[in-house]
Amino acid sequence: MDNFYEVEVFIDVEPSRIWSALTDRVELGRWFGWDAGTLADEINTFFFEHAVPDAGRMRLDFPGMEDMYIEVAPLEAASVIRAVQPGDGQEFYAEIREGWIGFFHQLKRYIEDHPGEDRKTVYLSGTGVAAEVAPALAGRLPGRDWFSGEQTRVIATESFGPGLGVLLASGGLESTEGGKLTFTLSTWGLSEGELTELSADWLSWWSGLVEGAEVVT
């Protein structure tokens, strides 16, 4: 059987540290998703109501979710976190796969550079042409690509903490047609006032590139 998806991200800490961040409610809120009002409920539903932890194997199983699992494993002097959903490939699962790519890189930035620190996020959404938005973002957010795939680009920036930007284009980053776009900017060390200014600034820029621009902070 082919995988629905398999996502791996390498993190430069010991496996037990990642397992803690994967199973502790407070730590989950420091890297998973973005600062939506529903985040705490989403974490509780997914990681606690639907997950079965096996601390010995450092693995979360999700009964009823098409045999999905998340595991943490040692890799030389570092670790790998892996999300797998086995079975026959289906396009529906592409969105889930891309979500884990972004979330696991958010975990990497948190646990390697900001352990125990709360973040603040700016989450932007809208409809636009990815082939125009992606290069515009590269010009606006200096940094290096931690990941660049068909639909997702992850930019590690020395600004904002250092921070992290995740651009997701449902139709592909090189698409010249309009499609759903989201961008999550994870920041550390900002005051509420600075976050408000940052959110307004990014929304203004985003609104010039997409239709139906919205922001969540």
Image: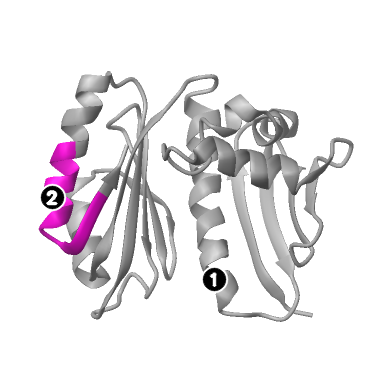
In this orientation, does residue 29 appear?
A: yes
Q: Compared with residue 199, is residue 184 higher up or lower down, i.e. above or below?
A: below
Q: Position of residue 44 (x, y in %)?
A: 65, 38
Q: Which residues are magenta?
A: 200-214
Q: Earlier in the sequence, mark 2 or mark 1?
A: 1
Q: Residue at x 73, y 78 (%)?
A: 2
- Tag 2: residue type? Trp
Q: Is the C terminus in the top left, top right, bottom left or bottom right quadrant?
A: top left
Q: Is the N terminus in the top left, top right, bottom left or bottom right quadrant?
A: bottom right
Q: Is residue 160 left or right of residue 39?
A: left
Q: Residue at x 25, y 80 (%)?
A: 177
Q: Is residue 38 left or right of residue 209?
A: right
In this orientation, does residue 75 appear?
A: no
Q: Pointer 1: residues within 10 angstroms few (<14), some, or many (20+)?
A: some
Q: Secondary structure at mark 1?
A: helix
Q: Position of residue 111 (x, y in %)?
A: 55, 30
Magenta-span inclusion, residue 204: yes
Counting every numbered tag in the picture gives: 2
Q: Residue at x 51, y 57 (%)?
A: 99
- Tag 1: residue type? Ala
Q: Provide the residue designation for mark 1.
A: 94
Q: Provide the residue designation for mark 2.
A: 205
Residue 172 falls in image quadrant? bottom left
Q: Compared with residue 144, is residue 217 higher up or lower down, i.e. above or below?
A: above
Q: Name the mark on residue 68.
A: none
Q: Position of residue 161 (x, y in %)?
A: 34, 26
Q: Secondary structure at mark 2?
A: helix
